[in-house]
Image (cartoon, grey):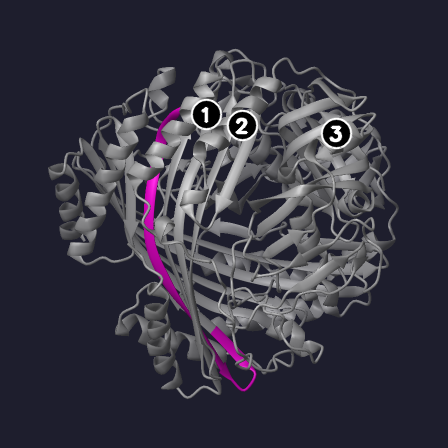
Amino acid sequence: MRDLTDRALDTATARGASYVEARVVRREERAVVVKTGTVAALATAESEGIGLRALVDGAWGFAATRALAPVEVELAAGEAVRIARASATAIRRPVALDARAPAHGRYATEVRDDPFVVPLERTVASLLEADERMRGLQGVAFTEALFAAQRDTKTFAASDGSYVEQTITHVGGSIEANAVEGDEVQRRSYPDNGGGYRAAGYEWFEELALLDQAERVASEAVDLLHAPQCPPGRRTVVLDPSQLYLQIHESCGHPSELDRVFGTEAAYAGTSFLTTDKLGSFRYGSELVDIVADATVPGGLGSFGWDDEGVAAQSVPLVKEGIFVGYQSSRETAPRVGRKSSGGMRADGWNRIPLIRMTNINLLPRPGMTLEHIIADTDDGLYLHTNRSWSIDDRRLNFQFATEAAWEIKGGRLGQLYRNPTYTGITYEFWRSCDAVGDASSYRLLGTPNCGKGEPGQAAHVGHGCSGARFRDVQVGVGKW
Amino acid sequence: MVTAAAAELALGLAERALAFAEERGPDQAEVLYLGEDSALTRFANSEIHQNVAESNATVNMRMVFGTRVGVASTNRLDDEGLRRIAEAAEALSRLQAENPDFRSLPESVPIEPAAGAFAASTAASTPELRATGARALIGVAEALGVRAFGSFSTSVDTIAVATSLGIRAHQASTRAHVTTVAMGDDGEAGWAEAVAVDVDLVDPEAVGREAAQRAVRSRGATSLEPGDYPVVLEPYAVSDIVETIAYLGFSALAVQEGRSFYERGKRIGAPLVSIWDDGHDPEGLPLAFDFEGVAKQRVELVRAGEAVDIVYDSLTAGREGKRSTGHALPAPNPWGPFAINLAMAPGESGDDDLVHGMERGLLVTRFHYTNTVHPKRAIVTGMTRDGTFLVEKGEIVGPVRNLRFTQSYLDALAGVEAISRERKLLRGSFTSLLVPAVRIGAFTFTGATEF
């Protein structure tokens, strides 16, 4: 491999690049989807290629090809330089990268049982059994059970002498039951909408124990069908980690990406309200709110050894005791706020450039109260569980979420189940209203495998750890029902 | 440069892959070739900051033993790569129990080539051409005192399908796409977009001018109390409604699973509203066949406000003893068929007439980050973005800060009062859309933001 990356780097340098990176990535995927009793998808996929990012006259060019023959790689290197030269005709601020020592080493996700070796028959049988159990309940209209595994084997080489090899393995699994009657359709899923993913081996899929949850999931879907509509009003809400993780993702993860702050995502996903004048002083949340971007967490979907610029994995505080203190950044953006890269540049495969992406954006647990204690400590409120939909404005201020289920909390006990719960607010007002965060015993590491960003589009696997939290005076029940 | 002949080469490769599949003795086999040669120049703060090009091709192989189906894909297109996915697809299919839902891969039917899908000028686009376009767009924005953010992309997509049932289909398509947000120092913003098969028909400077002028008009936005307002929606906003409605309601799988609002003959829109899917519309981004190699039929989804037909792939059609309408996605596809060449019928109003006909309401350029809150009622939430204006007595009186809506898109279609004569070709999340501007009697805004 080194011969290939050397050839790419040498070619781009000889053509005039002042700095160049080569990433060779091989991606393998396995997927099994069972839908309502039949195997709807049983598939494997592989994709490999090389992506070259070259800096010429202070401007970037990137070219990628699936063809790994030396002559094709040289063509791609030449194309990256040509594109960079075209970029240089329309730049105002030449790219300047922060200094870092050349990166060297190897990293691999800790895997006990290789998900690409475990016989698929076992997985198919497991999903069919969970699916059958869900369908055993009267009122369930359609179901889905999912297994997915992805492995990226990648080599990063740069003209500063960096050379890093990594193997990242992710595994996910989930079940979902849907109940339908008239114009009502209700869904319950486990472990969360979109699949419970981890950086791990097949052991994670087994740990999910989908079968054990199938009956509950089905039963709650049917119960929701006949549950009353969640009433509107201003309420205290307790967010289960299955919803809180996405609240963190949308309202802290994205706005603290420094490329958004500088406008480079403005035409697509948008910008951010966390402008640089707020760094170090803006009260983002209550003093209970500590949020970090941590790429070192074992099992996290955003964990790795080095990012795709060759910056070592690290943990960076974003919000400390409620104050906004840090960004997710890159070698190009960090110097503009007087800092070093947070190591957050990640690319979706060989054919995409690295962008600032979330690693594991975690709300740190607070000693004192478990999630159960928080509920018991709540006199009147709603316990919101499992994300169902999400939306937030292009500066990440006005958000609205829906969850699959809401249980009323009265006198510290869970009671009435409500369907179609929604809540809305302004990011910093919401986080400032946080008056309880669960302790480490309630902490769960979740994540999403489909965080979209960039043009051409990229999907990232990002992690979120949290333990549940309580928020006061929140608007729930939005819209006409 | 990729030429139209690339599709014939792609078909040859698909046939070669099919031979590897048939060596393993399946009852049926299908090979789908997807090639992409694309480039995208991205600019922000009136400078180019990302500039990329990609060349890729994937072979997707579906193999059927009895009614057991396995799928494997690779972008290694040498003999070893093709042989390996043939082995994998066979192994996967043999893992399963018989699938009672599966009838057959589609039969071969004649495919009428899609006229106007390929432009050599687009295929020959260079980084220098895109940079020149970006500079022109940036220049017009700067001249109006705002900065430009956006992208200019060109691509050649090659698709070929070969199956053991005799399907042989191939097409090369091109696309040029310019999007931009113009923004000023006070947060004012305006959007514009253009897409075409032929890059020569895309005018980046005109796109930049439209966005910049909209941004300038957006200066000094004031807050407006959320509530129900009549609206005029620009085509950019209408595209979200049409795509979402098609996705939620007019896929056969959604109907079969009971999560769709669709019932044949049900009134779901005002009599002015007609929506269809047509892969052969030369005003759209033509595509002659789907990812199973089935000829695309024109399917009327809504005619004069009433629900008409839905789209099928071979699996969902087989369940009902019907034939696919040519709307399959690549296998394996647990998500069902989709309409991806959508169009909404034009009306008789001039663009200004829509606004002139509104006593007090909002002119909305675009929606942002919409998401379904309730699929069967088509309740969607999202934000307005990049140009929202208050209209009084038929005239735009000023910009307003962005609002959140939580609105049934079915109710929105039912409330359509007027439709523009002009339509715009746009790209959705996974579709092309040819859509007009519309005026709707009431639209429910449920929140506001700070800009």
Q: Nearer the viewer, mark 2 or mark 1?
A: 2
| Camera sees residue A114 | yes
- Labels 3 and 2 within one chain: yes
Which image quarter holds the C terminus of chain B? top right
Q: Which sits earlier in the primary sequence, circle 2 or circle 1? A: 1
Label 2 is placed on what type of residue?
Answer: Ala
- The residue labelled by disc 1 is B148
Q: Nearer the viewer, mark 3 or mark 2?
A: 3
Left/right placement of residue B76 relative to residue B320 reads left
> x, y percentage for residue A100?
24, 27
Nearer to me, B299 or B33: B299
What distance separates the C-alpha of mark 3 from that of mark 2? 19 Å
Nearer to me, B343 or B264: B343
- The residue labelled by disc 2 is B211
What distance separates the C-alpha of mark 3 from that of mark 1? 27 Å
Nearer to me, A284 or B438: B438
Residue B152 in the magenta stretch? The answer is no
SS at mark 1 in the image = strand
- Labels 2 and 1 within one chain: yes
Task: Say if mark 3 contacts mark 2, CB within 8 Å.
Answer: no
- The residue labelled by disc 3 is B355
Label 3 is placed on what type of residue?
Answer: Val
Q: Which sits earlier in the primary sequence, circle 3 or circle 2? A: 2
Choose top left, top right, bottom left or bottom right for residue A415.
top right
Q: Give, as a single range, the part of the protein colored magenta.
A: B46-70
